Amino acid sequence: MRDLHMLDRRQRQMCIRDRDWIPGIRDRNMGIWQDVRVKFGNELEIVDTHVITDLPLPDTTSVNFIVQTEIYNSSKTTCTANLHFNIGDVSAVYPVSLNANEKRMIKLTPHECKELQMKSPRLWWPNGYGEQYLYKASLSLISPNKDTLDVKKMRIGIRELEYELSAYEDNAPVVRLNYNPTAALQDGKPVFDAVKRKKTDSKVRYTNYDGEFVPNLLKPVSSQGIELIKDSLMKEYMVIKVNGQRIYCKGGNWGMDDGMKRVSRERLEPALKLHKNMNYNMIRNWTGESTEEVFYELCDEYGMLVMNDFWLSTDGFNLNPLDNCLFIKNVTETVRRFRNHPSIALWCARNEGFAPNELEYMLAATLAKEDGSRHYTGNSRSLNSSGSGPWRYQFDAGWYYRSLAGGFRSEVGTPSLPTAETVREFMAEEDTWPISDVWYYHDWHNHRYGSKTFSELYKEGMDRKLGPSDNLDDFCKKAQLINYESHRAIFEAWNSKMWNDASGVLLWMSHPAWPSMVWQNYSSNGETAGAYYGTQKACRPLHIQMSLNSQHKVDIINTTLKEYRDLKVGVTVYDKVGKKIRSLQHKVGQVTANALTSVTQLDDIKRLPDFCWVKLVLTTNNGKLLDDNVYWLNQKEWDGKVLANLPVSSVNVLVKNFTKKTNHYEGRLIVKNPGQYLAAAIALTLRDAKTDAAVRPAYFDDGYFYLMPGESKEVCFQVDCKEGVDKLLLRVDGYNVELKDILLNR
């Protein structure tokens, strides 16, 4: 029996190493795993409906509705009714008459129904760019005697999608376009041909794939919805626009909701809250793994743009469909089911590859016909995109700036080890340390990158930076610092090239479907630690950062539609224990909306001590804190072993407010470092006062940070009410911080 167990273990390890991420659970998507409903209908039935919101961009003060619906008459006689569409204060009526057993597609525009217009609509925006307003809408069939024959209820977000991208016309050079699908796809015919693609001259940033391509343009540039633009900075890369505004995409890949299906709102909503709290605005539904209606509902509510793949996984790793027609039937059903969700921004054919030519043509035609409001792309990483990967640990975070950042990238990753407490929740104590083959059950990879494996690169990099570990607690504690630094670096590297070659980056991965050692922003139990807060910091809508390359540029990243004026930037350098070496102040007259604003650069780094801290502070003119950031630098190849010998610090916490609302608690804290040494990597967690069990997830606006001597920070948080948890403790810990518990409610 033990031999069989070991054989199974080895087989699982081989799957992890040699196939695409984690192979889908066998038979997982076969049979019935979602609710089945029996519907009793009348003679007239609304089979399907699609509502498109058409804004006269750049004007957003009014909207036209385009309503497409299929109606079926199941009776043996001709039937008539009135078709009612209602949304907000808009009410439109259109008479219909269908012959016996007739099924008809009806398309209503303001031309047929002048009532299909709304003034001063409340718009739907991605997270960070505005509110996520959702209108209740309905489409009803009312008989001549006023009986309701059928009704479809929906939530509609009023928004319009556009895309800046590159393509080429036959016998012509590559051109830059602004593409509006709502206008360009009115005839139901594709705009682009990905089969007839052209390879670009751009330098490939990561070389484990064939290169970067642009599609062939099937319609003239002068066609409706296709406009020639000039933008040499973005090259061939895609920019997603909502309501006429560029959206700087920050997000992660979602592999699956869970190891099993039938995932409830109660289980999924915390994950979407965590994404919003991280300041994400996009989720890639990798290979279409989530098929839950509630997933899209929550993306609508929390402002997550969705890049929605279909089910073709990595080219060369998995079989192509054996029945193209059946595949397209599934695509059609999926698109019809979810297309009214405003969050969906992209349909994508395949993860890291192109569909077979015949299937690609079928997909392009289907998407043009079934959804005339979004872009369809034939490849997740190579078409108007800048690739995917790498997924291993990079010892020098400056590598992301020098060699990788740029374009629209659908995947890039780095390991993300949980805390020791979480590891012990899913692993027997005897298996936790030293690292054992049980770790491979939880994605600890042995894939080779040259002479080193994935796991060796991570462990050796950590040992080199912070010193070797001889127990799980020390290893995981150091891992959080490494996770914070590497995840922050990925997003800040892309930030440093905002709209100058870079338009977005998606982490591999954000959401874990099960207990994992790698590739996650948070743990499957909802724990938020280093990787989460490093990402949260880098993705703040208004953010101060320093590039970790030779220039050490200090920039303000503004991914909002608000312009700021008269701000101040402080750049302060400290020695290893937190003693101030020097401080400079910079006035910034204007921070442009949705743009990068350069401030200064740390140009004399060679004159600094071998190890030092650099703190950036962004404030208003009257001193209100808007953002801060702390980096450690040295001249000895990121040797941070000095951190092991930092003097112990103690911080004080003042609970300014802690209130129980209907279904959650919310609070505000002042954390202060009164001592003479810095407090490094202060970690905040919530616990049950009775059992000391962690209460997860908790939504801190900053839960892993540094305080220099005498400094304080205001922290706000929320946590959902948990059954059986009456009193909460705030636990304060850190890299060199004395552990302290504070009772929040008495």
Image (cartoon, helix red, strand yellow):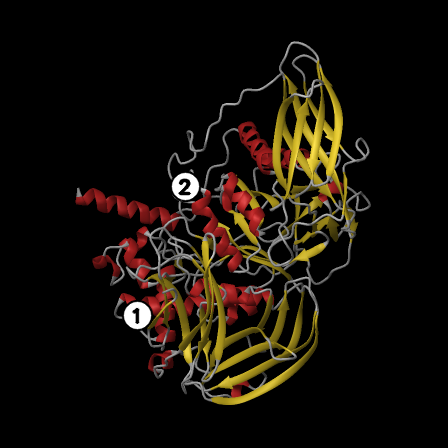
Residue 566 vs residue 3, the one in the foreground: 566
Give the residue at mark 1: 474
Give residue 648's position: percent from left, percent from top: 34, 82
- Give above or below for 486 relative to 137: below
Q: Which mark is residue 24?
A: 2
- Give above or below for 144 relative to 485: above
Q: Residues within 10 Å of mark 1 (few under 14, many from 20)?
A: few
Q: Residues within 10 Å of mark 2 (few under 14, many from 20)?
A: few
Give residue 170's position: percent from left, percent from top: 75, 44
Would you say 3 lies left or right of 424 here? left
Task: Please identify the quadrant where the N terminus is shown.
Answer: top left
Q: Amino acid at mark 1?
A: Asp
Element under disc 2: loop
Residue 70 vs residue 512, the one in the foreground: 70
Q: Amino acid at mark 2?
A: Gly
Q: State the separation of the CA atoms marked 2 and 1.
A: 34 Å
Residue 125 vs residue 308, the one in the foreground: 125
- Give above or below for 503 relative to 154: below
Would you say 399 lies left or right of 497 here? left
Asked whether the viewer can see residue 218, the reply is no
Would you say 553 lies left or right of 95 here? left
Residue that lies at the very extreme toward the top in this rendered image: 76
Q: Earlier in the sequence, mark 2 or mark 1?
A: 2
Query: Badges 2 and 1: C-beta atoms under 8 Å apart?
Result: no
Give residue 289's position: percent from left, percent from top: 48, 42
Element under disc 1: helix
Asked whether the viewer can see residue 271, the reply is yes
Q: Nearer the viewer, mark 2 or mark 1?
A: 1
Quarter of the image for residue 191 reads top right
